[in-house]
Structure formats: C-alpha cells, structure tokens
Image (spheres, helix red, strand yellow):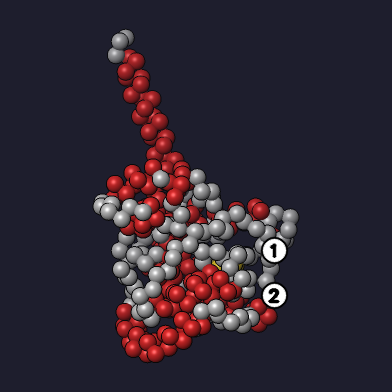
Amino acid sequence: MEDAKPRNGRRVALGMTGAALAWLLGVWPPPVWWRDHWPRETAMMREADRWNQGTVERANRPTFHPTALKDISPALQRMVIIAEDSRFWTHHGIDPAEVADALGLNNARGFWPVVREAWRHRDRLRGASTLTQQLAKNLYLSPSRSPLRKVKEAATALRLEAALSKDRILELYLNLAEWGPGIWGVDAASHAYFGVPPSRLTEEQAGELAATLPHPRSSNPIFRPDRMLMRRSLILARYHGVDVNIPPEEETDTVPVPTVLLPPAESLRIEVPSVVDSLEDSLTTRRTDAQGKADSGGRDSLP
C-alpha cells in the first residue's frame, strides 16, 4: 500500500505529460498531408470568415487559387525571404539567431539556451517568426498571441519542416498568406493590385507585395502606401546587393476586420510618390552591376 501513492503519482504525471504532448503535437491534417494536397481553407481564413458572418454573402466570400512555385515570380520569392526570413533556407523551422536578436541576446550560443531565454522573456518575442512558423499559424492556429499558442506554433513549424521540402513550404506560404483585406494568396494579390498573374510581376511590384506582408490590412498598395513604399525600397536595395538593414516588423494585423470586396484591378492601382525616391535613385547605377549576381544567385541565403 505504501508504494501505491508514488505509483499513482507517477501515472498522473505521465498522463498529464501525455496530454500536454498530445495538445502540443495534435494538428489535423498532419503536416505530411500537405505534400500533395491543398487546404480548402485555413484556420486564419475561418477566423476571418467568423468575423465576417452576416456582412458578406457566402457565395461572394474570397478564396484562394493555388499557384505552383514555378509560376510565381522568382523576384517575389526572393524578396519575401529577404524581408521575412533571411535564413529560411538554413534553419529548421525556428531561427534561434532571430529569436536571440529579438531578445537582445547577442552572446547567446546554442539552441536550448535561446529557448530557455525565449520562454523567460516571451512577452518580447515580436517579429521573430520564420516563414514556417507563419505557415503553421495560417494553417492550424488562431491569431492569439498567448505564450502557449507561440509554443504550439514553434512545435508545428518543426513538424512542417520535417515533413515538407523548403520549396513546398514556400509554395504553401505564398498561396495561403493574406495580402490585404479578403485577399488570400499570391494569385489574388497579383491580380487585385496589379492586374497580372504572379509570373509577370515586375521587381517593383514584387517589392510592394513583399513589403505588404507584415501589415496586409493596414499598409498595402492601396491603403497607406507611403509606409509600404518605404519598406519596399529597403527590400529592393537588399535584393540588389546593397547592405541595408530591414527592421523586423511586428505583425499587428492579427484581429480580423470585415472583408472588403475589391473593385476590378484596373481601378485599384494608384500611383503614389515614394518617400524614398532618393534611395531608389542611388541604386540605379548599382543595379546593372548587381543584376548578374542576382540572376545567378538562385536561392537567397543572406547573412
């Protein structure tokens, strides 16, 4: 009888541990499913749909049209990586270096020391999510910023990296991201803002889309474009080999807003003077020299 209590305690502890692991790893469909399938909708789309109940007829609610990676402008692919996750090709779902930078841990070394500090200072983790973590949130999770949700996001990102190729992760991300109010996926964004398919985006247009991602509802080629153009110019500079810093931006558009059904693309596109024309002018003479390097570089792995 004396051994019964310790045994029962161990069983309870094991049961609680198992339940915690089941919650942490429990997502459906499992990540391996996305190797050959597309979702009909994502968790973030459902959340937006919930907020839009009664404001938009179901038949008119926006959806996304899957576009193969080969049919998406290589410039856009590189610029999104430059802007959102410069070590995308080398990390395994979580970028300890980016987390350390966000926490000010310049001397931190190793994965687990960074994880411990990240948990201690989890309220300071803003703008450190990799593309894989953002995909995990879009596919499975809510827009909540609770620490537990961030932990599940990180665990799901690791599983996505284990199950999918980098190309597939990037393809899913570009097709499932929100690029504006009710604009889901790169195909919808390219047509809505510029009236062209993703394969025909110019460098400037690709830069505008990449600059839209942190705040797709509050700063895009239609709404507050000056803010977007400032970031676009930095992205273009980095794309052409200029050593400029692109400050990480917190994703502030986490609370869904009513979907706005957009008018035809030709009435959307407006020209707004860039507040950083001088920076773009200074790049002109450097672009020719950098173009060969950019064209031959393939995938980007920036320091």
CB under 8 Å between callouts 1 and 2?
Answer: no
- Relative to 132, is 183 above or below? below
Residue lying at 42% horizontally and 35% vertically, measured from the top left:
19
Q: Earlier in the sequence, mark 1 or mark 2?
A: 1
Residue lying at 65% horizontally and 58% vertically, measured from the top left:
257
Of the residues shown, which amino acid type is indicated by label 1?
Ala
Residue lying at 68% horizontally and 59% vertically, measured from the top left:
258
- Judged from the image, the secondary structure of the residue bearing numbered disc 2 is loop
- Relative to 123, is 246 above or below? below
Tell me the quadrant of the picture where the N terminus can be found: top left
Q: Toward the viewer: 109 or 87?
A: 109
Mark 1 residue crowding within 10 angstroms, few (<14) / some (14–19) / many (20+): few
- Relative to 11, is 20 above or below? below
Circle 1 residue = 59
Q: Toward the viewer: 281 or 11?
A: 281
**Measured Cα–Cα span from mark 1 to mark 2:** 16 Å
Circle 2 residue = 263
Of the residues shown, which amino acid type is indicated by label 2?
Pro
Which residue is the extreme one toward the front? 278
Residue lying at 68% horizontally and 56% vertically, measured from the top left:
52
